[in-house]
Image: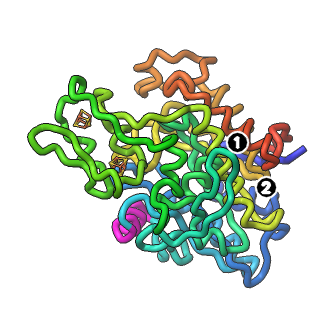
Amino acid sequence: MSKVFFASARVEKWRYEDSMPGKLERLLREVPLSAHFGADEWVAVKTHFGSYGAHRIVRPVFLRKVVESLITLNAKPFVTDTVRIKGLDYLEVANTNGINHLSVGAPVVLADGLYGNDNIMVNAGEILGEIAVASVIYDVPAMVVCSHVKGHINAGYAGAIKNIAMGGISSSHRHCGWKCGRGAMHTIGEGKLVWDSEKCTLCLQCEDVCPLDCIDFEDDTFSYADERCWRCGRCTRVCPDGGLTLPGDDKLFMKSLAEASKAVLGTFKPGKVIYINFITEVQPECDCMPAAEVPVIQDLGILVSDDIVAIEQASVDMLMKAKPLPASVAESAQIKEGDDILLKLHDKPYTLQIEEAERLGLGSRKYELVELK
Ligand code: SF4
Ligand code: SF4
């Protein structure tokens, strides 16, 4: 049975060892990091840089603790993420959110290049076929996956699986475009954007949020550059009136996240990836959105494991027991204690991600929770 190490966000003693950064250091000694990484080994610290306005990411102080812990082993860490908007702009997002070489203590690099098309095609499985794994993640021998646990309009729940499925795959491939990138997960088949002129209020939020300037409203009529569009779905997520949709299949989407995770993890030797889930500032939406909502539950803590399925199951089990916070969207949605908060918020079969990952052999949903004293 896989072990999942856990440190509570509650502080019982006013000393550094009981702070969240101090507890993270102690968790990394428990795992221990030295069993997975060695001297001179390059280690990717995979995180999500967030976006302008979505500040509730894994905080730089925690990334720094991971980096410092790796440096004590004489490993060579760097912090990375794949391109979500234009690459130079995305590096500026990282910097704005406090992630830079000075703050985290290691280089901050884009995993799939400034143009987001440095990637290697890898066989994923029956749903996705071949998919474009970011070249840096493909080549690096070891990785620490730092995931901010939160909700997600498409995935329902977003943790480690979502972080490496979406975040280890490029938006686009230089020859086969979005169909080999994360757009293949966001939609099924040709996946064209559908505009409903009856519902659209011409607020233009979709046009504003498109990272590729694909959308146009000439004569108050929607059009988009179909060939250029990544099928990232950002435009549909910000639409307040259901005027824009990207048809997909929820169950296939969840399973495809597990498939993409397998493709990414298949580029590593066994034991060379560990996972850190931060159940902190659990907001209802993805860190790529233009804003971050207030958390729907109180901070719970940090989990660390070398089993992606176990850590995801443990995270979801904790979320299930958490109380909805007042003055959050959970209260607006009249979610009660004991409800599955993320299911109520997004109505997505999110546990399928974890079940499918187990079926694909990525780990076990049975785990032993080891709490830091
Ligand atoms: S899905 Fe929407 S936001 Fe994303 S690239 Fe296409 S038009 Fe732009
Ligand atoms: S975000 Fe929705 S409502 Fe606003 S312009 Fe776009 S399609 Fe219309």
Q: Label 2, on which residue?
A: 306
Q: Is residue 127 visible?
A: yes
Amino acid type at image mark 1: Glu
Quadrant occupied by the N terminus: top right
- Between 19 and 313, the one lying in front of the other is 313
Measuring 46% from the left and 15% from the top, which residue is drawn there? 334
Residue 225 in picture, x, y percent from top left:
28, 52
In the picture as drawn, the residue positioned furthest to the left comes out as: 219
- Residue 150's spot in the image, x, y percent? 54, 40
Asked if disc 2 is less than 8 Å from ligand 1, the answer is no
Q: Is residue 90 magenta?
A: yes
Q: Residue furthest right?
A: 1
Q: Secondary structure at mark 2?
A: loop
From the image, tell me which residue sits under label 1: 312
Q: Residue at x 9, y 40 (%)?
A: 219
Left or right: 352 with respect to 183?
A: right
Q: Foreground: 204 or 295? A: 204
Q: Is label 1 in a helix, a strand or a loop?
A: helix
Mark 1 → mark 2, Cα distance in angstroms: 11 Å
Density class for disc 1 (Cα within 10 Å; few <14, some 14-19, many ≥20) is: many
Is the magenta region chiefly helix, strand or loop? helix
Q: Which residues are magenta?
A: 87-98
